[in-house]
């Protein structure tokens, strides 16, 4: 029997599916059925095929896939602006770690993650890849908000509020991974923090388990030149060499930061299918360096984008991160052709989904994928005139132009209003907790 | 006789006067009288002294000096996004210059400048330094909008729609300078385009006239390494050396871009009081290079900020430019302490006013200066929590958090609505003109 109604027809002025063909479609719409994209059709075809469908008409908007934030520490939003203009090592050792030791518990993570999720939805992300303590709490917050997430099963050599050491981190992580099996929104990844905080044995365990459970591995790698120097002192190897010997360089790996890379390391990552997660703003803000993204892309590496945590950015705005990535790659390589607007958009969508092994689920607007998408209103004066909507998305629009967000076909933001998070209530919770947080002097 | 009313008391939650003392004042207000700042007082003192004054209470806001955009080509807003991801030389020669030759006339400049002024007001600028054809039209648009501006008396060796060559550019420029003598809002500057487009004789004339008329000189200098190489070929000198011999290096000069600088050139600029106008986003986008701003500041040079035109940015958002300047300086110097949030705010305000020789008029909130100021609402979730409002302004806020703008005490934007520009009418004019503009193929 022919169905005469789809769940929704989303009819924007421009539709940019990010399908690898640089399509910018006019007079097209997305047909949503059972939380999925049933088809991309002309408006005429869709109305003929599904005449009784509710329509959402977005006359000034471009519809694109939801953005995929491939690296963040969501709960750190509560540390936004608490310690600026300080290099990574003293920033961590004298500010962030002492604050975390004193403050981080399940409630802190719940409120911080909720604040981050609200911010990420309003700035276009429909999926985020998190690394923090209490990943069970982050998972619950994402699920409650209707947000897609990959939560990191954090691993460190030293104890924190979340675990006493590698054995407990692992057992708690595996329990959570098991609990998440039924979720369509939230999935786990192994998250060994960094080469300098996790020793060989837990890394070997993670490699074996990641293969068994078919999970990604999410890790900070080569964030600063101090990290590579320290590794040479300690192991006689650069961190990537050590991880290579441990068998960790593979398409499972999301290697975050990667600011200091030799030409042969880029080659190796390309050959082994390592995904790089570029976090340009955090790398700049901490003075860590500038990742050679043009060379990585030229070598065929899958490069995704992340905001990092709000304590080192200081926002979780992946729309803005696209712009920074495009501009910075041009400036750093002194080649205006490096990271075009299209490449930046791909990095923030399909490349991110691919890095997380979610490209069968999201990352582009294509038949069969989940209806994870956002609408960007280009009618603001600072986006006029519009010669090329993709240029406007990457180079001119602010996050405030993002008016609608759908995940699994459900509206999480409509006309710039969050539908499932009470912003006033959230704000009260944030004020209550942050009133007790004082910057370290 | 004691006056019991001021024209207005502006009472924000935080007041950041940018007075060189890093003050962040609570319970303070700005007393506006006769378009000027009469005093900064505690709210209690102000209410006692001026009990009958109208009050504007801004409970979630930080009040700061209006931003000073020290380099733009306002009318080029009509070319926003028309040619991206292309290096400076082919971008100019194959795209921008052919489009300008075909399209630029007084009406184009009027509409383009109005669009730019609307965008600049909404993104926090209360003053802009322009360089383009038909500066008389730009001046009229600024005056009509109530916007402070310095209009460049453009000089080029070759003819354009605005003039047949140096003699006519100069005579038209001097006539305009004379006409602007009565304006409190708009003033002129000499604007020789660049070392590679203006020969020695007109530059000598400009130097003499700038001294006579006490005007700034606004010029693109060392934008790319090709520019310095070409100058060595043609003159046997780097552009700065040539300008030095012509007597142009002085506190009058706003040297825009300056991406390629030798250590001794930085020293010379510091000794001679040259102002540098840093345009980080345009420099990145065109792949021109990264100006060594940390070294310039460390040497005591007055560094201001500019957006450049919207064709190479692609916005005129000085709030965002502060953020890029702070992040980029840290990344490029690999020192997170480079360009702190405070320094970025000073670059975008008082340093800009100083470069334009307008620091007796604007650039900080101090008694006797014009009431040029903006209010930034920090209540958005992505600005929470607020430990330090200056960090939030530079690193977290979007231009959309700017809700109020005053120039000479007059409200140009109130609760995010432009008061003197009809946005719908402007948008219609933009659509009408841009409909005839096609990207060069």
Image: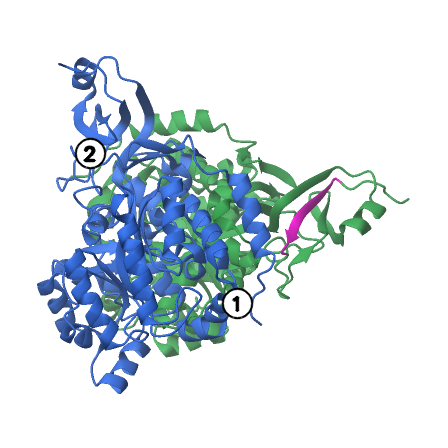
Chain colours: A green, B blue
User: Residue A278's x, y, as percent?
Assistant: 41, 60
Q: Is residue A177 visible?
A: yes
Q: Residue A168 location in percent, x, y?
A: 38, 46
Task: Identify the residue position indicated by label 1 in the image.
Answer: B102
The spot of residue B357 in percent (x, y) is 18, 51
Residue A432, horizontal then vertical, whole percent: 34, 25
Span of residues in magenta: A7-16
Dot 1 falls on a residue whose secondary structure is: helix
Work out which quarter of the rendered image holds the N terminus of chain A and state it: top right
Q: Callout 2 environment at 10 Å: few (<14), some (14 to 19), or many (20+)?
A: some
Residue, disc 2: B24
* Disc 1 with disc 2 on a shared chain: yes
Left or right: where does residue A182 sit relative to residue B275?
Answer: right
Q: Is residue A416 above or below residue B77?
A: above
Residue at far left of view:
B271
Residue displayed at 36% across by 56% down: B135
Q: Quadrant of residue A428?
A: top left
- Badge 2: chain ID: B
Residue A175 visible in rendering? no
């Amino acid at each position: 029997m022919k169905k005469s109604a789809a769940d929704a027809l989303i009819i924007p002025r421009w539709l940019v599916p990010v399908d690898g063909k640089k399509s910018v479609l006019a007079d097209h719409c997305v047909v949503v059925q059972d939380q999925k994209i049933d088809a991309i059709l002309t408006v005429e075809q869709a109305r003929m095929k599904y005449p009784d469908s509710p329509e959402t008409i977005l006359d000034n908007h471009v519809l694109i896939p939801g953005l995929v934030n491939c690296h963040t520490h969501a709960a750190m939003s509560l540390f936004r602006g608490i310690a600026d203009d300080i290099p990574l090592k003293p920033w961590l050792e004298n500010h962030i770690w002492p604050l975390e030791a004193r403050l981080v518990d399940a409630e802190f993570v719940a409120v911080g993650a909720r604040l981050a999720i609200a911010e990420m939805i309003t700035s276009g992300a429909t999926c985020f890849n998190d690394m923090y303590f209490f990943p069970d709490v982050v998972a619950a917050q994402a699920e409650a908000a209707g947000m897609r997430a990959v939560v990191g099963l954090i691993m460190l050599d030293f104890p924190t509020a979340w675990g006493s050491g590698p054995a407990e981190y692992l057992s708690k992580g595996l329990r959570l991974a098991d609990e998440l099996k039924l979720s369509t929104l939230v999935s786990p990844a192994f998250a060994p923090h960094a080469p300098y905080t996790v020793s060989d044995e837990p890394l070997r365990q993670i490699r074996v388990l990641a293969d068994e459970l078919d999970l990604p591995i999410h890790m900070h790698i080569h964030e600063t030149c101090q990290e590579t120097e320290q590794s040479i002192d300690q192991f006689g190897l650069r961190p990537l060499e050590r991880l290579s010997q441990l068998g960790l360089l593979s398409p499972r790996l999301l290697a975050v930061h990667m600011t200091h890379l030799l030409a042969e390391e880029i080659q190796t990552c390309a050959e082994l299918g390592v995904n790089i997660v570029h976090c340009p703003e955090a790398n700049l803000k901490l003075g860590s360096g500038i990742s050679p993204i043009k060379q990585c892309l030229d070598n065929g590496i899958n490069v995704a984008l992340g905001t990092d945590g709000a304590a080192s950015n200081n926002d979780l705005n992946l729309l803005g991160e696209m712009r920074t990535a495009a501009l910075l790659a041009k400036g750093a390589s002194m080649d205006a052709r490096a990271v075009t607007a299209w490449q930046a958009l791909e990095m923030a969508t399909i490349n991110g989904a691919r890095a997380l092994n979610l490209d069968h689920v999201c990352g582009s607007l294509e038949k069969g994928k989940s209806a994870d998408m956002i609408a960007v209103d280009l009618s603001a004066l600072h986006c006029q005139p519009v010669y090329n909507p993709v240029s406007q998305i990457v180079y001119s629009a602010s996050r405030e132009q993002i008016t609608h967000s759908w995940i699994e076909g459900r509206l999480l933001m409509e006309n710039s209003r969050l539908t499932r998070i009470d912003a006033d209530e959230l704000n009260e919770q944030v004020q209550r907790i942050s009133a007790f947080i004082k910057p370290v002097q």
